[in-house]
Image (cartoon, grey):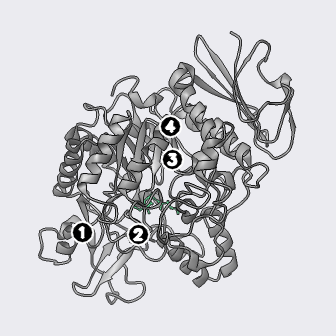
Amino acid sequence: MVASPWWSSAVVYQIYPRSFADSNGDGLGDLRGIIDHLDHVAGLGADVVWLSPIYVSPQDDNGYDIADYDEIDPMFGTMADFDELVAAAHDRGIKIVMDLVVNHTSDEHPWFVESRDPASPKRDWYFWRPARPGHEPGTPGAEPTNWGSFFGGSGWAFDAESGEYYLHLFSRKQPDLNWENPEVREAVYAMMRRWVARGVDGFRMDVINLISKTLPLTDGIQLPGDPYSYEIERVANGPRMIEFLEEMNAAVGISERQLFTVGELVLGGVDHAREYTSRSADRLGMVFTFEHVSVDHDGSKLNPKPLHLPDLKQNLARWQAGLAEDGWNSLYVENHDQPRSVSRWGDDSPEHRVTSAKALATVLHLHQGTPFIYQGQEIGMTNAGFTSIEQYADVEAHGQYADATASGVPAQAVLDALAAMGRDNARTPMPWTPEGGFTTGTPWLPLNATTAEINVADDVADPEGVYAHYRALIELRHTEEVVRSGRFELLLPDHETLWAFTRTTDEDALLVLANMASHLSGVPMGELPSLEGADLLLSSVYPGTDPQTLAPWEARVYRLRG
Ligand code: TEU
């Protein structure tokens, strides 16, 4: 891999197509809707668009269950629309990255349908296993192992016809592919090559570190009170991970073509990340970690706890240090699986929403790595505010709700946890105008109740809005070498409300200082580098307070005098 790949100064904008823009009034976003709104993305200055899955899918998990990797789902449009979107993006200097979901397929994929027949040559393309010895197939406890599905319940589904079980780490409509089989791998690489030939510039690889599992598949450790095992070592980062990544890289020409790759590292630490993104090897460009988005809950997302800021900033700092010499970081706080950051770690009250959104953006974008912006984050969208289980569409919300209530957790507690952490928080449609502007029909998921106040038209028109701030941050990354390559040092690591760090090269130094609280804060000048002669490059608050004080959620980027 080259020393400074192009994505080290790039910013990615993630589009969740079903919730972005609906051009035909069916209530679901589509490709023409994206084409119509591409200038919104171009106006930010983003370099790359990552599209969540648009392939043919029964939509059990909103497209992360794929039935045909080579066709566009009619709900999103046609292949001609897709070609037009790629061309329109490229015309604006924007690259297109596809979601690659190859740990599993849909159970409606022809490969899986064929594999249901035990005599079929495709049987070995998935993990089919007999019942646990001594157990009647299909009875409780007869599953081949005690593995749980991430979406609740057992990770094994019983198939009465053949009397065997298949593995599904996600929903039962998402059977896991068996990457041990070389035909599976070649089929995936060939499909990737076809998309590259169509003009796509890279891949976001869904749960990529689950593709190598530790064989044989055996029982994992169960935590007290948990009916299933979620022991990581058995399902993730298996012994053939590196081999598969390098084989894929070579087979698709990833390094050779400088394709963008980001692998979702569903379970794994910074050491795995360094190995998978090493600059001296041809594997992945970067990975998504889950560590920093796990600091505000205990084990399960259903046990949220208040953020203790030092945990978050120290975690990110550890990843900065861990990948400083080798590897590369992705930087994100939102995506289609995470709640809205302004509700989670900012202050979404009318008084502080905009400033706290800008403060969060400032600290994240001034770290080293490739920043990701999730649709709506750039206008400071807030959580959905759902209060009953019927309002949720997400398969995960329903699965986890069923598991938790069955094990005795009060329904209200689960609803509170979902309101804070549920994935549908990020999936409400884009509010383009105060009236909505997402669809002329009935949206598949209701728009946020705040749409009259929080929408694209109003925010973009405001020179001090969230969108303008993101544009300035992207501009800074494009123009300032120190933002791209400067060394990172966390200051005041234990401070509970201030986030302070420096970025330095031999020629340049920046100080980032942010008040992550809804009250005024003094600046501990004695514990920071001298601000004498420093230039203020960017701030989240106008006109800004005196240097000794930080307004609520005031974030500043200084260039220090050399
Ligand atoms: O997510 C991986 C994943 O593990 C998430 O489900 C996440 O851990 C979960 O929300 C935590 O409770 C990827 C996709 O981003 C997600 O949308 C898919 O549902 C999942 O894979 C299966 O493809």
Mark-to-mark CA distance, 2 and 1: 25 Å
Residue type (three-letter) at the residue carrying disc 2: Asp
Mark-to-mark CA distance, 3 and 1: 29 Å
Task: Tell me: residue 443, above or below residue 306.
Answer: below
Circle 3: is it few (<14), some (14-19), or many (20+) Cα within 10 Å? many
Q: Horizontal and vertical percent for residue 128?
A: 26, 73
Label 3, secondary structure: give it: loop
- The circle on residue 289 is 3
**Quarter of image, res 339:** bottom right
Label 1, secondary structure: give it: loop
Q: Horizontal and vertical percent for residue 480?
A: 55, 21
| 230 left or right, relative to 30 | right
- The circle on residue 109 is 1
Give the mark nearest the N terminus, 3 or 2. 2
Question: Taking the image as drawn, is residue 132 in sight?
Answer: no
Residue beneath the point at 47% across and 72% down: 395
Give the mark nearest the N terminus, 2 or 4. 2
Mark-to-mark CA distance, 2 and 4: 27 Å
Label 4, secondary structure: give it: helix
Indicate which label's residue lies in the foreground, 3 or 4.
4
Q: Are marks 3 and 1 in contact (CB under 8 Å)?
A: no
Residue type (three-letter) at the residue carrying disc 3: Thr
Question: Taking the image as drawn, is residue 46 in sight?
Answer: yes
